Amino acid sequence: MEQVDFFVNTGESFSDILFKKTPDQISIEVSEMNLTEHLSFTSETFNKLGIDLKGDGMEIAAGAGVFASSITRLYPNVTKMYALEIVPSMVTKLQPKIIDHTNMTGRVIPMIGDFNDIKLPNASLDFVVGFNALHHSNTLHKTLSEIGRVLKPGGKLIFFDRAHPNFMSLAQENFLLEREYWPAYKIDRGLDLNKSYKRTDNGEHEPRFRDWNKAFEKTGMKIELIAVFAQRTFKRFIKVLFSLVPFIIRKKVGKFECIIEHPKLLLFYIFPWLAQFGKLKYYTLHINFTTGASKVAMKKMIFIASKKKS
């Protein structure tokens, strides 16, 4: 029986729905921020980490190309960026709309393709970026190896994604992946309300830190830094405290079952400067979002990896 890729099938109809919306509305749907907020978010996080980009780059699983547009707007020495996306209508309809609106025509290059089979020569890119993309890979080691192939020696892979503590139980992982999407989500994406659609159907995975480390082995790349940017609010502090309660208890009472936090996040709320030591660092995110707390992720994790120089 042929396996159905729900993520790709959903993307086709979803892009048609999004095409009717404004560039800012498209950006909110695909990145949780409008275009101005995304630009400010990228600027704040990259500047705090001392990231400077130039030459030729690529955004993998680029969707509407919002991240690629933010990168090229921030870094004038970036010659061009390929916006690689597997869903054709995202590339042919949404990317041109975002690129034209941000005046990045000629610098952001729409590109239909698979991040497991990038149609570019070896060692042809100076950097690759991704925004909530790599955890969708069913073969993470293969995807990272392919990215390593197209990077030049010394080239950077910089991506926002998720990594759960190694102590996350299999029961909690399954709970997260088997969650059914809510009706409003299905309506927004043109899905059948009468059919089951879970996070696993959307190509979601919940990797732990050890899964990322294992996937990077023998790819020619090495993780240099993992940083978390978060807004320090009382509400989020309370959620961090609840994350310390064993999952089996939270599931039994039906509260905060989805929360999984690294213990270092608690240190970030009490002594924030101490949380900036070590390979996993925490930084305060200062950008003011206007799109609404229910739509915006107030915490983002970024990975920086580099390809070994020959």
Image (cartoon, rainbow, N blue to C red):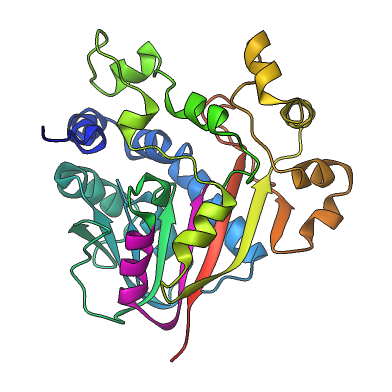
Does residue 77 belong to the magenta stretch?
no
Q: Closer to the camera, 163 or 193?
A: 163
Residue 50 picture quarter: bottom right
**Residue 120: quadrant of the picture:** bottom left
Whether 248 is drawn above or below 85: the answer is: above
x and y percent of residue 296 in the render?
Answer: 54, 33
- Name the residue furthest left: 1
- Which residue occupies 57% across, 54% down? 210
Q: Is residue 179 left or right of residue 259?
A: left
**Image x and y of residue 121, in percent:** 21, 79
Q: Which residues are magenta?
A: 141-162
- Quick one: 95 or 57, which is closer to the camera? 57
Q: Percent from the top left, x then y, of residue 17?
A: 22, 27
Q: Is residue 132 above or below residue 144?
A: above
Instruction: Tell how many labels.
Output: 0
Q: Nearer the viewer, residue 213 or 240?
A: 213
* In the rendered image, the vertical position of residue 41 relative to residue 11, given as above or below: below
Q: Quick check: 270 left or right of 4?
A: right
Q: Is residue 53 visible?
A: no
* Residue under the image location 56 percent in, 28 percent down: 172
Q: Is residue 8 above or below residue 49?
A: above
Left or right of residue 87: residue 189: right
Residue farthest toward the bottom in the current orientation of the protein:
310
- Residue 146 magenta-drawn? yes
Residue 68 visible at all: yes
Give the quadrant of the C terminus: bottom left
Rendering coords of residue 179 (x, y %): 44, 21
